[in-house]
């Protein structure tokens, strides 16, 4: 394995610094739609990074489920490790990487729970099997290596037979109120295009960053 010689010379696109959107959410949506068109994988997959109460960072892949003027929303178990981190420290980061487009987007901001009504609405849109799964998994807790969910699932299916599966109170959404978004476009010879948007009071500012 020759890691030191593994490299690519990016040349698929570039950022037009003379015609940048004033709002980074608008810019993100353009890139996101292009990723949806070309990606064979989940374009909404991103890495969420949190920091624990003892200042240790942790990262994992989550799925983006909504984008609006308020920010970026994902859903999870409120008793999971990531949620415990967020309750101790709301500052989080998201990272999107679309290799097919040679693009990366880095996002930071504060995460807060969305209201119950919005969490309920999204929960109802999920497949029934996914709804039942939220009741079965105590996310991040230890279980035996030979644990089998089949028996528990059978009991749960019987409990909700002929009924709507309601959202458990320990599951719902977080919205990240964004304060920084950086767009990165791979360029030849590592002279990558980078533009950083920062929110201050009620306006977005933008500036180009060196590769």
Image (cartoon, grey):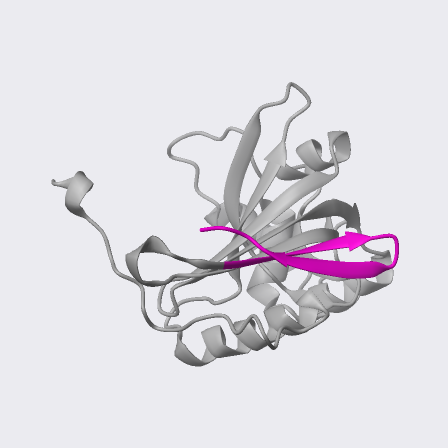
Q: Is residue 17 above or below residue 94?
A: below
Who's the residue at 74% across and 59% down the image?
205
Question: What percent of the width, then of the height, locates residue 9?
Answer: 26, 60
Identify the image quadrant of residue 188: bottom left
Magenta span includes 206: yes
User: Is residue 169 visible in the rendered structure shown here?
Assistant: no
User: Is residue 17 visible in the rendered structure shown here?
Assistant: yes
Does residue 84 appear to the left or right of 141 in the view shown? right
Q: Main secondary structure of the magenta part?
A: strand
Q: Residue furthest top?
A: 54
Who's the residue at 72% across and 71% down the image?
22
Question: Which residue is more in the foreground, 135 or 15?
Answer: 15
The magenta region covers 194-211
Who's the residue at 64% across and 64% down the image?
65
Q: Is residue 156 above or below residue 185?
A: above
Magenta span includes 98: no
Q: Is residue 178 above or below residue 138?
A: below
Question: Which residue is more in the foreground, 21 or 56?
Answer: 21
Quadrant that contains the N terminus: top left
Identify the image quadrant of residue 203: bottom right
Does residue 178 appear to the left or right of 140 in the view shown? right
* Count of numbered tags: 0
Question: Which residue is more in the foreground, 68 or 165?
Answer: 68
Question: What percent of the width, then of the height, locates residue 95?
Answer: 53, 52
Question: What percent of the width, then of the height, locates residue 177?
Answer: 77, 53
Q: Residue furthest bottom?
A: 37
Question: What percent of the width, then of the height, locates residue 166?
Answer: 75, 60
Who's the residue at 38% across and 34% down the image?
146
Does residue 92 appear to the left or right of 97 in the view shown? right
């Amino acid at each position: 394995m020759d890691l030191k010689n593994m490299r690519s010379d990016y040349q698929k696109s570039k950022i037009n610094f003379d015609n940048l959107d004033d709002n980074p959410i608008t810019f993100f949506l353009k890139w996101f739609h292009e990723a949806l068109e070309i990606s064979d994988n989940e374009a909404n997959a991103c890495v969420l990074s949190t920091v624990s109460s003892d200042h240790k960072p942790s990262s994992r892949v989550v799925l983006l489920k909504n984008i609006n003027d308020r920010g970026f929303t994902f859903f999870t178990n409120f008793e999971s490790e990531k949620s415990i981190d967020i309750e101790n420290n709301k500052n989080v980061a998201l990272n999107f990487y679309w290799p097919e487009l040679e693009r990366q987007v880095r996002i930071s901001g504060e995460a807060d729970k969305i209201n119950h009504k919005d969490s309920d609405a999204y929960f109802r849109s999920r497949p029934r099997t996914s709804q039942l799964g939220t009741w079965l998994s105590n996310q991040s807790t230890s279980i035996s290596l030979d644990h089998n969910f089949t028996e528990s699932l059978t009991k749960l299916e019987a409990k909700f037979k002929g009924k709507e599966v309601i959202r458990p109170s320990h599951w719902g959404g977080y919205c990240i109120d964004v304060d920084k978004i950086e767009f990165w476009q791979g360029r030849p010879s590592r002279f990558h295009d980078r533009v950083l948007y920062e929110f201050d009071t009620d306006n977005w500012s933008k500036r180009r960053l060196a590769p």
